[in-house]
Image (cartoon, rainbow, N blue to C red):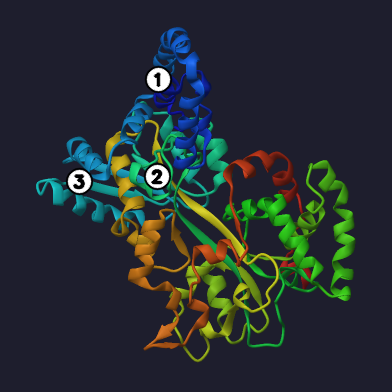
Amino acid sequence: MKKKLLSCVMAGLLAATALAGCGSSGSSSGSSSAQSTASGETAAGSETAAAEAAAPEATIQEAETNTADLTPTQQIIQEAEGMTLDELAQKAIEESNGKTFYGVGNSSRGKTALPLFIAYLQTIDPSYSMEYEWQQPKNNKIFDQLSADSAKSSGTFAMTLIQDGNQIQSKMADTGVLDTFIPKEWAEANGTTADAYQGFLPLQTLNKVFMFNNTGTKTFDNCWDFIREGEHPLFMDIDSEVVGKNFLTMLTKPEYAAVLKDAYDQLSDDEKAYFDPYIQEEQQDASDFGLDENGAYALAWIRLWMENYNAQTDDGPICETLTAASATDQSGLLVYSKLRSIEESAETSVNNITVAAYQDGYQGIGGYGYCHYLFVTDNSPLPWTACAFISYLTTTKDGFSAWGKDMGGYSSNPTVMEETEEEYNHKEGGYVDGVDTYPAKDDRGYEWWAGDGHLVLEEPQYCADADWTIGSWIEGLTRWSPDAAQ
């Protein structure tokens, strides 16, 4: 949605000409929006009467026209964004009692969360019942499935939980297949309003982090170490999980290119000598792409990563490999939460790996973060129920519990994040009977990863804008083949 037309009009009427254009609706926080409105009221002064005489009729007519342009689902979302979870629950009960709810997502845990949601609705109306089905398409088929479903006058899927900001932006949001709903209480917890918030609604941020097997003698204390000569880090192939390409694309954004340059500066002269030719070769590409002065460092890092990573189809096997005693000196970039599933044995142990960014003195990026986003399908058969479910997932600890029980997944709601940590104590995830037995599992939390851990955070619009240039360039790079190397 993010159009919020009617509320913009009302703000304009209150502040008269000083708020022409509803500029405050682009604010990143509720407080900024409020300050803009307050200053507008003061500045209007003696011009208010004249402005009110000239502006309201045309403005209201424009708002009515624009509101009429919204689809039925978007109109419901506009209303729902002003309602609490309990108010939405009443709407959901009226709409879906005795019906079947279909959801689709990149995470299978939606199937775990739905019965919790139904139980919540039953606390309001004990007679409420709803059947449900949750699908998890493989191999990036979720976009095809949603696109096909969007062709129906009334779709099958009520909502989706989906990843890959690039394709969401270009294939789902820009084409009107999916609509963003911002729950009122989620916005309040983040210090903003649905009108002011820009972007998609994230359920959570997940992190993939650099790890290495520590049973040998190699050290990986700089992110450039993972692409030095002879290294072939394990990584889920970008064809299997496209968010990996988004990670590489994001490295070209100035703030992350600067982190790569700073890490490069910490290398020895001999180490720099290996990378310098690649950096020089990428100067022209960096210029062609309009990148800043550190762009060539980002492109060189991306190129060497693409030419040398050992492509895998899933993070689970990567984790099993790296934690084996026999995987001496191997490294990888994988989902942090996979460490939870390792069963300790003589051959396999979490203590056989080191989370690179947790080392004192580590330089550079520690991994990347990507989101699971929540959307209402524009032809949703149960839009009120979808909004209520999305609100339940993002504003309650119980709703997030299907994901929150594991480290490495951080609720986008700071209140829910705090409550989740209080219950599960992920910061001491490696403790056994009060002893820090597996330090690699002591999750330092989102704030640390986004700060000191230099997590590269996906931005859908940046990835979508760069896809035809940098994205195409990435796809055209040579990839390392184990067979060719033998």
Q: First in sequence, mark 2 or 1: give its number.
A: 1
Q: Which residue is mark 3?
A: 130
The amino acid type, in three-letter code, at marker 1 is Thr
**How far apart are labels 1 and 3 at the CA level?**
32 Å
The amino acid type, in three-letter code, at marker 2 is Ala
Secondary structure beneath label 1: helix
Residue 403: numbered disc: none
Direction from residue 165 to residue 330 in the image, left or right: right
**Up-down relation of residue 226 to residue 193 (above or below):** below
**Up-down relation of residue 378 to residue 15 (above or below):** below
Residue name at image x 79 percent, y 48 percent? 292
Q: Which is in the foreground here, disc 1 or disc 3?
A: 1
The amino acid type, in three-letter code, at marker 3 is Met
User: Mark 2: few, some, or many residues within 10 Å (few <14, many ≥20)?
Assistant: many
Secondary structure beneath label 3: loop
Q: Nearer the viewer, residue 120 or 59?
A: 59
Assess whether mark 3 and mark 1 are in contact (beta carbons under 8 angstroms): no
Residue 67: numbered disc: 1
User: Mark 1: few, some, or many residues within 10 Å (few <14, many ≥20)?
Assistant: some
Q: In which quadrant will I find the N terminus?
A: top left
Find residue 266 and report its horizontal and vertical position in percent: 79, 71
